[in-house]
């Protein structure tokens, strides 16, 4: 669609001041959508169920500690800079992004560690230390990952795939890149050491995918990190959320909290507004949903208005794993613990198979340990540390009763942390809370409690994924993890960028 210069956007707003867009949900995708729509002449109202912004990027403040509820890794800061530029500001005016080096530390079950460095020479030396015979293969893999990145992310990451012809056009490229392979199989063609195979293939877990099933296109994440780095926002990811809310307000638009949408109003096949759980009805010219996509169609869009995304199709789809997240603060600091640490159990493929296929809660697990106070001590009281530890678990179809299982599972995680990373830490815990897949369902309205919406299988990617412009309802648009290009901070920001191509400018609606 047409993109107007800033002066044209301003005049368009004067010509058609009443064009109203509703955005359901204030996750990163929803906030980015609101900013982009505001820059294109819309009067925007963001409706948020919770008492504050962020969605999965909500911030918990407890006993003097501040915890990012969800994403902590920023790998494509240029996507944020684009949003700030739309409002005539620099990202650095509101957010202090700090590059991390190493990106993260991987601790294998035998005690060996591998640090993933930003610098190419440092990373090459680390690979040589772990497995000298794999250095050449590692470099060949990174070259291939760069090629996948340029096609999968730069060329196709922000196009809508609204027509099957779009999919047919790119199929030859996908075949050439061997996207029919899974990520782990793809990596295994280049390196032989099982530790390096893990280090180069685990990234799909960051976006809800099984490395042994998702397309090798997700191998691009390894190069995305190398090209743009891994960053942390001082004050936490919540600072980015607050900055985005500030941009929306600068545009003269609004974010409403405690405003849960119970229905998208559809008249003559088009979205014409929403109804809140309070009974309030709000009219609009377009509706953008940043709510969980499966939830949007199954709970918010009337069944009579849906042909493609029927209840049966939604329930039959494959969903990402769930997450068990334990947030805690300690009265002492652990200076030897890195900002990001991945603690591996004895199994890799078998464990993810238990999670994704068998849907059982295994006795062993692998953990992601986040210590943001390693970079920003202000997130905890003086002399203290803030942590969260995350464990991938099955989604709610597993039938696990988290009301009775959560404490037992937390204790099992605590035993592992005590033995491999934080000796004696339980004596120093001063604040604690957990989130389970049941919380993702009840609090975040995530279908089946899946943490990342639809699993990013090839059969659920690009055209096969729910479209950014609804296939069922005119003037309904979708952003966030459940649409193209998928989950993760870059993915949801790109989903909002796609709106520039599929949503008419306010002056043209």
Image (spheres, rainbow, N blue to C red):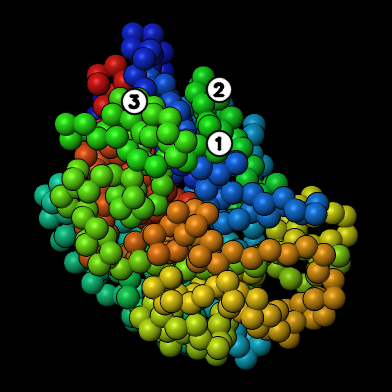
Which numbered dot is residue 250?
2
Image location of residue 225, percent across then percent down: 50, 59
**Can you identify the residue that label 3 sits on?**
284
The number of numbered discs placed on residues in the rendered structure image is 3
Mark positioned earlier in the residue sequence (2 or 1) = 2
* Depth check, front residue: 455 or 228: 455
Secondary-structure class at tag 3: loop
Which numbered dot is residue 8?
none
Image location of residue 116, percent across then percent down: 58, 69
Name which quarter of the figure residue 499 lies in.
top left
Q: Is residue 230 left or right of residue 290?
A: right
Name the residue located 58 percent from the left edge and 78 percent from the top edge.
405
**Can you identify the residue that label 1 sits on?**
257
Name the residue located 63 percent from the left edge and 45 percent from the top edge.
238
Name the residue located 19 percent from the left edge and 43 percent from the top edge.
305
* Depth check, front residue: 32 or 230: 32
Q: Is residue 271 left or right of residue 343?
A: left
Of circles 3 and 2, which is in front? 3
Secondary-structure class at tag 2: helix
User: Label 1, label 3: how many angstroms apart (C-alpha)?
Assistant: 18 Å
Image location of residue 350, percent across then percent down: 43, 88
Secondary-structure class at tag 1: loop
Residue 111 seen in the current view: yes
């Amino acid at each position: 669609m047409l993109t107007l210069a800033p002066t044209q956007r301003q005049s368009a707003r004067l010509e058609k001041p009443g064009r109203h867009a509703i955005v359901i949900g204030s996750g990163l995708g929803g906030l980015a959508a609101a900013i982009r729509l505001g820059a294109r002449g819309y009067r925007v109202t963001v409706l948020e169920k919770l008492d504050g912004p962020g969605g999965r990027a909500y911030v918990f403040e407890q006993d003097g500690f501040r915890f990012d509820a969800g994403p902590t890794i920023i790998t494509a800061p240029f996507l944020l800079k684009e949003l700030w530029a739309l409002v005539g500001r620099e990202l650095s005016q509101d957010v202090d992004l700090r590059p991390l080096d190493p990106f993260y530390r991987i601790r294998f079950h035998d005690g060996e560690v591998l640090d993933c460095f930003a610098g190419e020479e440092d990373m090459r030396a680390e690979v040589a230390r772990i497995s000298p015979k794999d250095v050449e293969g590692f470099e060949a893999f990174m070259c291939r990952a760069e090629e996948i990145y340029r096609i999968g992310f730069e060329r196709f990451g922000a196009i809508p795939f609204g027509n099957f012809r779009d999919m047919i056009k790119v199929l030859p490229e996908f075949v050439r890149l061997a996207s029919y392979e899974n990520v782990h199989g793809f990596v295994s063609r280049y390196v032989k050491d099982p530790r390096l195979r893990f280090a180069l293939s685990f990234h799909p877990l960051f976006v809800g995918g099984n490395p042994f099933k998702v397309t090798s296109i997700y191998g691009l994440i390894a190069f995305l990190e190398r090209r743009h780095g891994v960053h942390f926002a001082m004050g936490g990811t919540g600072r980015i959320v607050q900055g985005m809310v500030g941009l929306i307000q600068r545009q003269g638009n609004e974010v409403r909290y405690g405003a849960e949408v119970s229905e998208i109003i559809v008249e003559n096949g088009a979205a014409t507004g929403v109804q809140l759980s309070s009974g309030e009805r709000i009219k609009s010219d377009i509706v953008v949903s940043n709510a969980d996509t499966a939830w949007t169609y199954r709970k918010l869009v009337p069944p009579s208005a849906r042909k493609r995304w029927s209840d049966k199709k939604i329930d039959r789809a494959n969903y990402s794993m769930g997450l068990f997240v334990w947030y805690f603060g300690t009265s002492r600091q652990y200076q030897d613990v890195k900002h990001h640490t991945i603690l591996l159990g004895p199994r890799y493929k078998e464990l993810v198979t238990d999670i994704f296929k068998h849907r059982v809660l295994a006795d062993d697990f692998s953990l992601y340990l986040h210590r943001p106070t390693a970079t920003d001590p202000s997130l905890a009281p003086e002399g203290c540390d803030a942590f969260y530890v995350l464990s991938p678990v099955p989604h709610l179809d597993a039938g696990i009763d988290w009301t009775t299982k959560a404490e037992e599972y937390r204790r099992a995680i605590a035993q592992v942390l005590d033995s491999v990373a934080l000796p004696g830490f339980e004596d120093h815990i001063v604040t604690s809370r957990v989130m389970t897949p049941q919380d993702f369902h009840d609090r975040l309205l995530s279908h089946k409690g899946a943490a990342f919406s639809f699993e990013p299988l090839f059969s659920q990617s690009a055209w096969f994924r729910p479209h950014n412009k609804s296939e069922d309802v005119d003037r309904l648009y979708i952003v966030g993890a459940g649409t193209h290009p998928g989950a993760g901070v870059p993915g949801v920001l790109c989903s909002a960028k796609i709106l520039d191509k599929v949503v008419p400018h306010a002056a043209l609606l």
